[in-house]
Image (tube, rainbow, N blue to C red):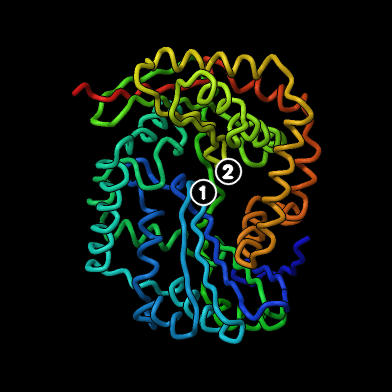
Amino acid sequence: MVSYNKFQLDNGLRVIVHEDQNTSLAVVNLLYDVGSRDEQEDKTGFAHLFEHLMFKGSKHVASFDGQLNLAGGECNAFTSTDITNYYDVVPASNLETAFWLESDRMMSLKLTLDELNAEKDVVCEEFKEHYINQPYGNAMHQVRKLAYKVHPYQWPVIGKELSHIREAELSDVRAFFNHYYSPNNAILSVAGGVKTDEVKRLAQKWFGEIEANPNLTQRSLPKEPPQEGYRFHRMEADVPVDALYMAFHICDRKHTDYHATDLLIEVLSGGTSSRIYRSLIREQELFSSLNAFPTGGFDESLLFITGKLNPGVSLEQAEAAVWKELERFKQERISEKELQKVMNKVESSIAFSEVSIGNKAFYLAYFELLGNISDVNLEINKYQQVTIEDIQRVAQQIFSKENCSTLHYLAKKK
């Protein structure tokens, strides 16, 4: 169980505290309710760009990393389709340093043309390295465009096109920051060797005077309509071997079927004893690698099945074999042993995640953003309530041709 105290400042900043006097460290986690789904279709990649810009200094701090390092701390951040998360690990005795640094860049980030151009170059190189010049790097771009027609999940976090970052104007970037990087759009969670009263004092001191954004409105994104037909795309590229990409629409994170869907994916592809590994890699030797995984968005997401083919196997043959396995999954009940095995894995994962104060700080903010912070202590119970019938029912809903978008990624003939 993760214990916590929660309060809110007058400017809307939600603050959560987990006290753990068994450690001399503290984690300050600042989660902003903004991700790539909040971008305009012709201005994508901004959320990820800010993950870089936030470390370039602010009004009173020339170097964020430098000041934190002097206090014996370290920091990092990540961006997803739904959130942008920043975290600092410091000795608990230097907790105020992290508060000072995070508040200063929330209130007065240094956004100059020179800083923007420098980070645009960095992000553009990242785009080229991982998505343009990397073998199969553009595959997810292609599949997302197939699967989503109106929802902003149709582009990845890095952005839809390289030109959107390269051509980003300083005025657009400032407007994005001013709108989303405000106290009433953030959750501050602190975990470790801290006291709630001290966190309250520091939160009020360093964040209390930052003005809320009065124009922040409830998010209203276009809802993706149900897919009503099989979608297919075929492309050639200079890659080592042919690859198969299949995407199925699945429920959102708050849906009652989320936990059953997660267990379904584990049964299907969770390790070398999973269904598709045993059948399609070890027994039939059609694939050299094959995985199933969710995108894990707050809104209705995707379940991907991706694999690299063995020499001599055609994409048509490989896809047909996957469909045969999925049909068998839909029709045959999984065994109690299979369910118990994946349950053990999930329970261990949750238990290990609660060892780290960094994980505790993040998940407290995460579940608060989802709408019910108490769910942080109910996840195991929700998994344990999933039945074999639930998994089979969800499989029957997901694995249909009408719900599938498929990419055949062919290696150019030498």
The quadrant of the rendering that contains the C terminus is top left
Q: Residues within 10 Å of mark 1 (few under 14, many from 20)?
A: some
Res 73 visible: yes
Residue 112 picture quarter: bottom left
Res 148 visible: no
| 239 left or right, relative to 59 | left
Inspect the image, locate mark 2, and give the three-letter code of the amino acid beneath it: Phe
Q: Which residue is mark 2?
A: 298
Where is residue 31 shown, x and y percent of the image?
Answer: 55, 61
Identified at 72% across, 55% down, the residue is 351
Identified at 50% across, 28% down, the residue is 305
Q: Residues within 10 Å of mark 2 (few under 14, many from 20)?
A: some
Q: Secondary structure at mark 2?
A: loop
Identified at 49% across, 82% down, the residue is 72
Where is residue 61 shown, x and y percent of the image?
Answer: 38, 81
Is 349 situated above or below 71? Answer: above
Seen from the viewer's position, the closer of residues 55 and 125 is 125
Seen from the viewer's position, the closer of residues 290 and 193 is 290
Residue 51 picture quarter: bottom left
Q: Which mark is residue 82?
A: 1
Is 312 situated above or below 216? Answer: above
Mark closer to the chain start, 2 or 1 = 1
Where is residue 292 shown, x and y percent of the image?
Answer: 54, 32
Could you tell me if the residues under marks 2 and 1 are in contact, i.e. CB atoms within 8 Å? Answer: yes
| 23 left or right, relative to 164 | right
Inspect the image, locate mark 1, and give the three-letter code of the amino acid beneath it: Asp
Q: Which mark is residue 64?
A: none
Q: Secondary structure at mark 1?
A: loop
| 24 left or right, relative to 245 | right
> Gap between marks 2 and 1, in whole Å?
7 Å
